Image (cartoon, rainbow, N blue to C red):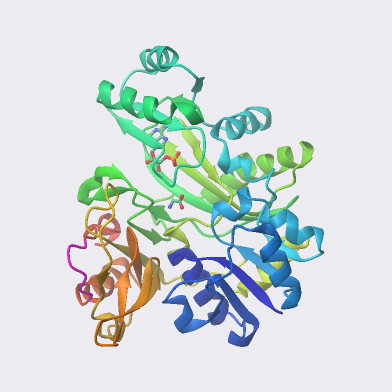
Amino acid sequence: MKILVLGAGAREHAIVKALLRTGTNKDDLIVAPGNAGIALDAHTEPSLNANDPLAVTKFALEHAIELAIIGPEAPLVAGVSDALRSEGIAVFGPSQAAAQLEGSKSFAKEVMAAAGVPTGMARECSTIEQVADAMDEFGAPYVIKADGLAAGKGVIVTNDRDAALAHAEKFMHIGILVEEYLAGQEVSLFFLADGKTVVPLTPAQDFKRAYDNDEGPNTGGMGAYSPLPWLPEGFVEEVQRDVAQPTVDEMAKLGTPFIGLLYCGLILTERGIRVIEFNARFGDPETQVVLRRLTSSLSGLLYKAATGQLNGAATPDFTKDVAITVVLASEGYPDTSAPNRPIYGLSEAEETGIEICHAATAFQETRTGEEVLVATGGRVLSVVATGTDFASARKQAYAGIEKIQLEGSHYRSDIAAKVAN
Ligand code: AMP
Ligand code: GLY
């Protein structure tokens, strides 16, 4: 089966590695645009704009693509899935309309209300006075969310009233949602959806804050681990029954069937499971650990989802081994962007047994004509390690990441620390 993967991050690199590990031939795989690391594992098409529906469709037809897998949200929101589907190509990724489940937080709240899905109370606000009133209603800590795509920077959780109001002011042009604060452990659980049926993958936890002990600003995600040994019995079944299935049913009822990955961002509160967000795509960096543990054919699963055949399909298998990922970020991330700097030590790092998923890297020619790998963005790469237990997986991940040299870079040292004893 000829497969096109769209995207350029560590998530897409993890998807590529999982496809290759579970039976896909390298010759059947094209990634657009990809990045320097993905190009080491698969054929990439750096000049194809993944957000351009017409260009992607033309390319897919020319290359006889049988399955398109869409990594990030931008092509979904741009309508790339719709364009591909209109030419009869199987697509793992929701339509533009269905991707609103991620693109618009107020739409997601409406769907949850209609479907009876448990979530936090929220108020939609279009003036700063309404924001202040909603903050008074819910009390501190304040949760302020931009009602649209903001590259992981749209949410602030803070006790600082002025900071909360300033954040609301900054994103007022795309709409603001003030939400009640939910206390508890966070869980990311992914479901494959074919428009009707949902199939769970395996739970993971993401570390959203920039620094150790959950300090510092929110980021796209600084690390993750899977599975979550502390989850109560029946957790996955409960989320499937009370969250994923009713949401996909409601989307079908609205005439916008959800085909692709339903990312359920959950908080396990004292009063039960609550949804804090939906995404319409694989999470980054959770995908690096979830797919690292997958042993079933990834292309088979995604093709079934894309073609309405999940009902009755075998549920995916995962190894009992645990996986952890640690993200290496550039100096200043997430607040400022660092200049492109060279990265050294990747082969030494890989010799420790870790896997490296590249996020923002490129090969650049030096003045002497040498090719060096440079960091080109905030989250530069994800180091992934597995083991029979979290202590050994952590040891390997950190032994690996320590070998990587990138001036000014930082990473969290406490990923999966709480479960490693
Ligand atoms: P979101 O983009 O909605 O996932 O929010 C980003 C992060 O903010 C989440 O991963 C949580 O850590 C935090 N967060 C979001 N909503 C809430 C909430 N209602 N209560 C507490 N923390 C939240
Ligand atoms: N790791 C959070 C996200 O992908 O949105």
Tell me if I can see residue 181 in this picture: no
Q: Determine the quadrant in which ligand 1 lies.
A: top left
Q: Is residue 302 above or below residue 191?
A: below
Residue lying at 34% horizontally and 61% vertically, measured from the top left: 377
In the rendered picture of this protein, how many numbered marks are placed on residues? 0
In x, y percent, where is residue 348?
25, 85
- Residue range highlighted in magenta: 404-409
Query: Which quadrant: the C terminus?
Result: bottom left
Q: Residue furthest left?
A: 408
Q: Could you say which quadrant of the image residue 66 lies in?
A: bottom right
In-front residue for pair 362/334: 362
In this rendering, position of residue 128 left or right of residue 212:
right
Q: Residue furthest front?
A: 367
Q: Residue at x 48, y 82 (%)?
A: 41
Residue 186 position by quadrant: top left
For the point 24% across and 25% down, the residue is 160
Per the picture, the main secondary structure of the magenta-coloured stretch is: loop
Asked whether 402 or 54 is in front, the reply is: 54
Q: Is residue 408 magenta?
A: yes
Q: Name above or below for residue 332 compared with residue 129.
A: below
Which residue occupies 24% across, 58% down?
412
Residue 207 lies in the magenta stretch: no
